[in-house]
Amino acid sequence: MINIISKIFKERNHEEIESSDFKIFSLKEKYNYWVVICRNNLAEIKEEQTSLFIKAKEVINKPHFDKNANLLVLYNISNIEDANKDAILQTEEDPFHFKKSVIYYTEEELNKLSEVIGSSNISLAIETLILKEDVFTKHKSAFDANEYQSLLYRIAHKIPFTEINIPQANNLESLEEINKNAIGQNPLNDILEKELFVLTSDELAALTNENLLEKLKPILSDEN
């Protein structure tokens, strides 16, 4: 898993900073740092986070690290049923030292995902796969069924710079374009522009209800 995550960071413009204890990635030319660790037991995190923070800060040696430190925990479990959701939530909500994220996975899920991705660009593969209807349907119908689809969405959810590019389907206009066209085709706009917007404030104030009704007659139905 660490190899997949490392490639994602590098493909998304993060550089790796040398460290013997863990992986550290920094977004190039930005003050954003990710410490990536692999663990089989989340109980260790709270106990060792102070030590992790101090070591990482020494490696980074930048004053911006304190407020821009992220900890990504790759939580390896033997069986999908072993994923302790309460422990994951408690770890991620812990406010000290790091902003924390946990990606849990089994070796079976990881192997299946690796087979699907192959040697392609991992970031692009993930961003493409999560938009496929059959992938989403499998994830939704068999959530956490030890298949690669759910792991795919866990990765996309926990790594914030995953891009989701949803193409415009069937050449349909965007809602904004539809609204603009609808406004442009409204005959009231023509009346407002030609009859009312050209008037001064004094002329508008002097308009009686009868005058206004006369100007609006072209767009009113016969019933009105």
Image (tube, helix red, strand yellow):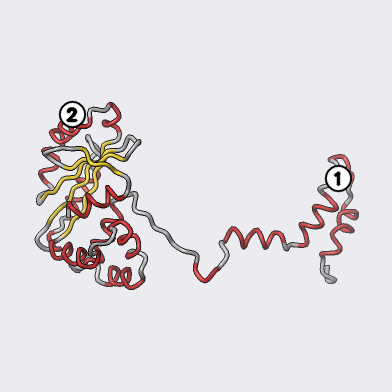
Against 49, is 154 above or below? below
In this image, 107 relative to 103: left or right? left
Residue at screen point 20% across, 63% down:
114
Point 84% across, 40% down: residue? 201
Determine which quarter of the picture holds residue 84.
bottom left
Residue 17 against residue 87 in the figure, above or below? above
Left or right: where 87 falls relative to 68:
left
Classify mark 1: residues with Cα within 10 Å, few (<14), some (14-19) or many (20+): few
What label does residue 199 carry, if any? 1
Instruction: State the residue at coordinates (29%, 58%).
Output: 121
Q: In this view of the protein, which residue sits in the foreground, 223 or 192?
A: 192
Residue 197 point in image, percent of width and height: 81, 48
Q: Residue 96's x, y, as percent?
A: 22, 35
Q: Nearer the viewer, residue 81 or 130?
A: 130
Image location (x, y in percent) of residue 154: 26, 58
Label 1 secondary element: loop
Task: Locate residue 124, reporting x and y percent.
Answer: 33, 59
Per the image, the residue denoted by label 2 is 58
Q: Amino acid at mark 1?
A: Leu
Left or right: 173 in relation to 26: right
Left or right relative to 71: residue 213: right
The quadrant of the rendering that contains the C terminus is bottom right
